[in-house]
Amino acid sequence: MNESAGGSLWRMPECEHRPVWSVTAAPRDTARDRIIAAASTLFCHDGFTATGIDAVIARAGTAKATLYNHFPSKAALIVAVLEAEGDAWRHWFFERLAKLEQTPQARLLGAFDILYDWFADPYFYGCPYIKAASEFDSRHADVHGSVAHHKRHMTAWLKADLAAAGVDDVDQATRCFVVLIDGAIVAAQSSGDPAFALNAKQLAKMYIR
């Protein structure tokens, strides 16, 4: 790979596959759409702090003034990317979840099969929220607010299904499932092995029983 604009070492071909769980699969009809798609691709693969604005501009094919007309700062762009990625991923995930057998146990365990499909996608790059949380400390309230917003969506679903499944301590069970899900994501990203989702599923099955 050759170094390019902004010092980024990673480049996906222009004929790139656009994974349905990412905002990069959305239409790019406006300059804002192109900026979000470009920034998401670079932030999620190269890192939020390592990616410069010039690299985003080069990939999006827009002028610097255009970017700043939509996003007054890099921080604002990062938050916009996180929100867009979260919307796209949750839409994909909960749409898949709705197709499972509609019992709480089926959803709670089937979620790990959905995660397996995510991990097995060759364009899987991990969770942008976990990446962002690891790069920015608590002083970056906007970034951590976006992370918390996404987590609230996930924990609300977990609490509802765990309560319906009849577990004794819903709050404790929710925390355990968050550990299983986030741990599987990190393990799959670092190892390239999607089977960590199935290992987590076995632990979840034991917990529900």
Image: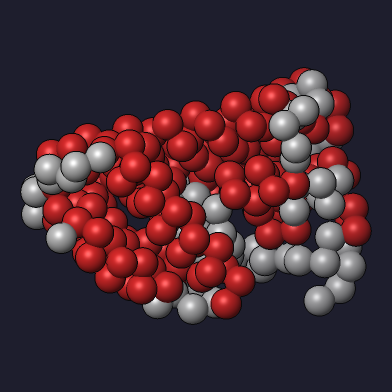
**Left or right: residue 66 compared with residue 114:** right
What residue is shown at x 19% (from left), y 56% (from top)?
208
- Residue 7 lies, in percent from the top left, at 90, 58
Q: Quadrant of the C terminus?
A: bottom left
Q: Is residue 64 above or below residue 43?
A: above
State the colouring used for the structure image. secondary structure
Image-quadrant location for residue 32: top right
Residue 123 in the image, given as x and y percentages of width and height:
54, 67
Nearest to the observer: residue 52 or residue 126: 126
Q: Hey, which quadrant is residue 31 in on the image?
A: top right
Residue at 75% across, 53% down: 47
Front residue of 3/161: it is 161
Whether residue 38 appears in this view of the structure is: no
**Image coords of residue 182 (percent x, y):** 48, 55
Would residue 84 appear left or right of 205 to someone viewing this image?
right
Residue 108, above or below 3: above
User: Which corner quadrant holds the N terminus?
Assistant: bottom right
**Residue 8, x across and y down, in percent:** 84, 60
